[in-house]
Image (tube, grey):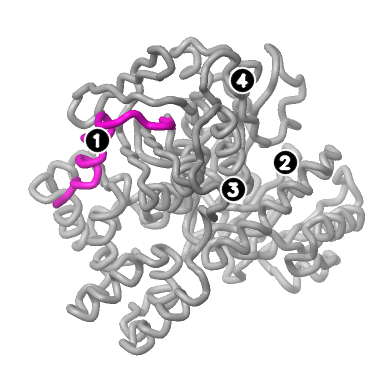
Amino acid sequence: MPGKLRATNISKLTEQVYDVLIVGGGINGAVAAAALAGRGVKVALIDREDFASGVSSNSSNLAWGGIKYLESHEYLLVNKLCKSRNKLMRAYPSTVKEIRFFTTIQKGFRFWSFFVYLGALLYWIMGRFATAAPRYNTAGDIKRREPIVNTSNAAGGLEYSDCYLYDNDARFVFNFIRTALDYGCIAANYVESVACRRAGELWVTTARDQESGREFTIRSRVMINACGPWADAYNQMVGEKTEYHHLFSKGIHLIVDRLTDNRRVLTFFASDGRLFFLIPMGRRTCIGTTDTQVENPEVGVTEADRDFVLDNVNALLDLEKPLTRDDVIAERVGVRPLAVSGKGGKADWVQLSRKHVIEQSEHHRQLTIFGGKLTDCLNVGDEVVERVAAMGVIVPYPENRWYGEPGPDTRREFMLQAKLMNLDAMTAPISSEPLSERFWRRYGAAAFILLERIRADKREADLLIENAEYTRGEIELAARREMITRLEDFMRRRSKIELVLRRDEIEGAPGLHEACAIFFGDKAEEKLREYFDG
């Protein structure tokens, strides 16, 4: 039944007193829920929009150790982020993958190119040699190995390793939500906290279902504000004062057709001195980013933003034809929430790091998570559990490992079953990888469900939406397990279809109507119109 998971969870939100209510389903809220639920705490989570619908679906899709913070001498932060990156690599080997960053340094840059290479060596050492070693490149080496790079003003360059998310950031975040659900967390998207008050030792939160308009009450012993850029506004609404608050830096990315067949990140320093990436995204390339201070987290892509990215990429590459706005397939925009203490914060806001801060209310059992980034997410989850336990909440299974892919034995069993049924022979020609690898990475142990369905009916392995790597079986699995409330939830966040297909390709996809019928039943046409009219 379409929507059953969400409807069931909303009804359960009122049925008991939860140990913890988490408000916000971005990366911070998702890992907090997974960590707490995975260690036996009774958790509820709500988000006024979809999970990962804000900052967490507009990143560069990188899990990196923060090499740029070497310039500001934040060595402890770099050390911590490198350890976090390595931990993610070990825990999610199918998702968090090493990739080479092919970097060009222009003449007149603030550092000599070989000095930057020495910095990359230090970064590699601080990363405990978990990745391939850096390599220095002359301008000639750069042109020979990556002809698309404009080397007319290049002093030299280097190549070093970091990590990226194979699918996309929002999918990575949702998998933590799914993990939390598997451990008994009651989570629901499109549920807004509209009021919150103390009643004795409890938090009483008035929530509104954004789909039906119905309001109801959620009771909890602890409340966690994981609203990301909206954390300050939420604290103001509930009357909580904090030492920390956020400054906002807007960043955008433009997605275009693939510019180079080499599967590595092309790295430059843009005209404003910031790192500038061309990141592989299957048949597309993701270009960015910008860094613009803004006062409000509600942001959009401006003409100036587009021109900045396009002007820089056209100057930095030798393209047969300059990129124009007509070449842009999709855009991503979001704000980086930067945690600062006091009223003013640092004057040089560009130098602020993305480190997270978890602040506890002076008088109440309430936590606010400030800042943070994908790379450091596992530490956020563990720290939240420690803080909640310190507030008197019993954590029944404090040693349970709440994150990571299923173990190697489970993976071997899945791959054996897939091989015995000749699954990979059913992979569509346009697919970038075998079905077995894709199913395992996206769904983990739940991928066994797909094998069972395909054994029963081989049509379950057919691509449902042309040029998008999603089979009929995956759509059916998502309808049951991934709380697809609006079509955008699937097209933009559970998948990256909206990021890699042009609007006319999506509108003309014959399988889209069937996918909507699977997701929404008799509301399929209404949801389809809502998506295209939105």
Please state the horizontal and vertical placement of residue 85, each as a whole percent of the image: 66, 55
Q: Judge the density around disc 1: few (<14), some (14-19), many (≥20) Cα neighbours within 10 Å.
A: some
Residue toward you, 295 or 448: 448
Q: Using the image, tell me which numbered label, if any, was put on residue 432.
A: none
Task: Give the Cα separation between the discs numbered 4 and 1.
Answer: 31 Å
Look at the picture and state if 329 lies above or below 110. below
Please state the horizontal and vertical placement of residue 416, each as a whole percent of the image: 41, 85
Q: Three-letter amino acid code at disc 3?
A: Leu
Please state the horizontal and vertical placement of residue 71, each as a whole percent of the image: 84, 42
- According to the image, label 2 marks what residue? 274
Residue toward you, 263 or 205: 205
Residue toward you, 420 or 57: 420
Task: Give the Cα separation between the discs numbered 2 and 1.
Answer: 44 Å
Residue 451 as seen in the image, left or right of residue 27: left
Magenta residue span: 1-22
Q: Three-letter amino acid code at disc 1?
A: Ile
Task: Give the Cα separation between the discs numbered 1 and 3.
Answer: 27 Å
User: Residue shown at 37%/35% (left/top)?
Assistant: 44
Which label's residue is closer to the chain start, 2 or 3?
2
Q: Three-letter amino acid code at disc 2?
A: Arg
Q: Judge the density around disc 4: few (<14), some (14-19), many (≥20) Cα neighbours within 10 Å.
A: many
Decide if residue 304 is in sight here: no
Magenta span includes 453: no
Kindly report which numbered mark, 4 or 1, lies closer to the viewer in this rendering. 1
Magenta span includes 8: yes
Q: Judge the density around disc 2: few (<14), some (14-19), many (≥20) Cα neighbours within 10 Å.
A: some
Which label's residue is closer to the chain start, 2 or 1?
1
Residue 419 as seen in the image, left or right of residue 370: left
User: Residue shown at 83%/64% (left/top)?
Assistant: 139
- According to the image, label 3 marks what residue? 378
Which label's residue is closer to the chain start, 3 or 4?
4
